[in-house]
Image (cartoon, coloured by chain):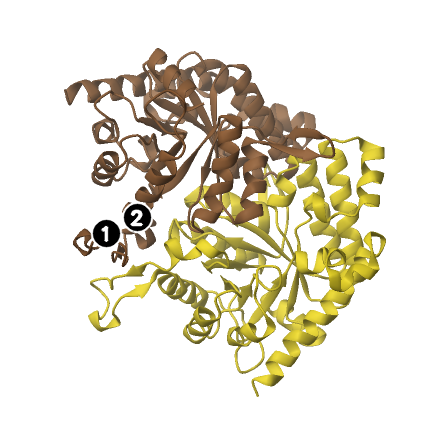
Chain colours: A yellow, B brown
Amino acid sequence: MINKLIAKIRKSNAPIVVGLDPMMKFIPEHIRQAAFAEYGETLEGAAEAVWQFNRGIVDAVCDLVPAVKPQIAMYEQFGIPGLMAFRKTVAYCKEKDLVVIGDVKRGDIGSTSEAYAVAHLGRVQVGSQLCSGFDEDFATVNPYLGSDGIKPFLNVCREEKKGIFVLVKTSNPSSGEIQDRLVRPEESESPEAGDRPLYEIMGQYVKAWGEQCMPEEGDYSYVGAVVGATYPEQGRMLRKMMPRTFILVPGYGAQGGKGADLVHFFNEDGLGAIINSSRGIIAAYQQEEYARFGGSGYADAARAAVLAMREDIASALEGRG
Amino acid sequence: MINKLIAKIRKSNAPIVVGLDPMMKFIPEHIRQAAFAEYGETLEGAAEAVWQFNRGIVDAVCDLVPAVKPQIAMYEQFGIPGLMAFRKTVAYCKEKDLVVIGDVKRGDIGSTSEAYAVAHLGRVQVGSQLCSGFDEDFATVNPYLGSDGIKPFLNVCREEKKGIFVLVKTSNPSSGEIQDRLVRPEESESPEAGDRPLYEIMGQYVKAWGEQCMPEEGDYSYVGAVVGATYPEQGRMLRKMMPRTFILVPGYGAQGGKGADLVHFFNEDGLGAIINSSRGIIAAYQQEEYARFGGSGYADAARAAVLAMREDIASALEGRG
């Protein structure tokens, strides 16, 4: 799947993933009203609005981008109907040949992590049958519990030819509270290694897991990392440290990351990173720049925002020479 | 809700939470066969088996224990039908007046964490209505992303009078890879503080969040911590450090934690901790000790295992005395 992602990035010339985080306030009035008219102001109504909204976005951008990243929390808040809209969105995007990164940030231990891996990337045994739960192509994973929590994901990825992105340095302002804390070298390490921030330790783990998870051909592992666009210096360092790790970069646009910040996340081959934008694309029509599209043109606004983002990244990458 | 949990622990004299982690292999043949006969070897069939299994356990133990902890991964692996069984289980346990701790280990940033908090503990706005997604009483939360990820949970807890348990030191063998790493004091701290393991830093955060989240009356915050029974020394230290933090303790039984290890997790008042056992109770009939119950007596076996666990904890607590 990592190779499919890379091939699609090359073909589209757009290392962009569209974050499908359909908050109610992003959904134009006419879609909400139609859904509520059919299902009432219920979880079903909300889920229908989410699904119709997503379908419009996906139809408008699927020829431009390689991948989408639905954020499951935005669906989970609408309970079972919301998760049905998540599942439907995943399936629809796959029908459109988009790579689907489930932003689920799951992580637990042993058999519990295995259950999450199976839920999102694999198939579960039911009697003599194998059944799929949500069936994304990639999932994001939280590593706070250590290797016990990651290995079940690696096993499922190996079997199903899928992949994960492990949280290393997240884009939010308080990510440093834990992730930037300076950590002493372990006894087994050279003391010259010196103190290093926790995200660097995590980067080393991701690198090591990734080395066990290389596809038969290709330069990049199917174990990737999440590193926020809002931390370009850390991105530069992690990029060098983990040359064969694909980096999923959130934080572009609404969270403050700019095109020029992004160059550090790419390798010399122009690959190695995929940049996420969520509200900057799906709610573009609410920004001054794209206000002319209005609510009824929200999907066209999203398309225009993708084109602008593609241009921004391309010129930043050219600019670095 | 923390006060309700404490009152129920006092009344039952059982600081025990039953982990409802219904793996297929724990479910007796007769329940699986009946479910598959009705729904086929499908996700629906698996979910029906899970639900029937849970109902039997809950009926058998609800007068003995204050709380249950369904592990959502074990339901999520069965997709939408699995999550419907999760929701049904939560609702049924609440009907039986059990406190429900959703073991969901969610955690993200800002509006995304808010969506998770709303999904599991709160109500979501849909037009003019407020709707509930899964509606547990407590949720477990992963803190790797820092305060940005926790605060939305605190807000929802405050509004809904619910609570969270934040992962501090997990019970699994590799939890030390990240959580035990020695961290340097920050510039703002006294240098005499010295290096401390990351779980201690996390304990400090939990303590600080907890101080902002005290119920109007009572000694314990509604922001608790997860500390594994398999690490009694760390439990002792964290217990002292966070006197008003309730500790959810997994790892008893199957993972190797014993009654004697547990005393360190309790305060002098005999409170402050609640011990989880999952397979040790729900799959008791598969252990030699309870094999006489057989698959058809799985619920009675679970009841017997709860009684034995209550006794084990009570005598350990008396023994320290």
The quadrant where residue B30 appears: top right
Does the image show residue B176?
Answer: yes
Does the image show residue B42?
Answer: no
| Image coords of residue A155 (percent x, y) | 48, 55
Q: Residue at x 83, y 61 (%)?
A: A292
Q: In the displayed structure, does residue A129 sit left or right of residue B294?
A: right
- Same chain for mark 1 and mark 2? The answer is yes
A71 up-or-down from B7: above or below: below
The chain carrying label 2 is B
At label 2, counting other C-alpha atoms closer than 10 Å, the crowd grade (few under 14, some 14-19, many 20 or more) is some
B107 up-or-down from B135: above or below: below
Of B69 and B220, nearer the camera is B220
| Image coords of residue A53 (percent x, y) | 77, 49
B63 up-or-down from B254: above or below: above
For label 1, the SS is strand
- Residue A267 is labelled as none
Amino acid tagged 2? Ile
Q: Which residue is mark 2?
A: B201
Q: In the displayed structure, does residue A270 sit left or right of residue A242?
A: right
Which quarter of the rendered picture does the N terminus of chain B lie within?
A: top left
At label 1, counting other C-alpha atoms closer than 10 Å, the crowd grade (few under 14, some 14-19, many 20 or more) is some
The chain carrying label 1 is B
| Image coords of residue A171 (percent x, y) | 51, 59
**Disc 1, disc 2: CB below 8 Å?**
yes
Q: Which residue is mark 1?
A: B196
Of A5 and A115, nearer the camera is A5
The quadrant where residue A94 appears: bottom right
| Image coords of residue A213 (percent x, y) | 48, 65
Amino acid tagged 1? Arg
Real-space Cα distance between discs 1 and 2?
7 Å
Q: Residue at x 56, y 42 (%)?
A: B114
Q: Residue at x 39, y 28 (%)?
A: B214
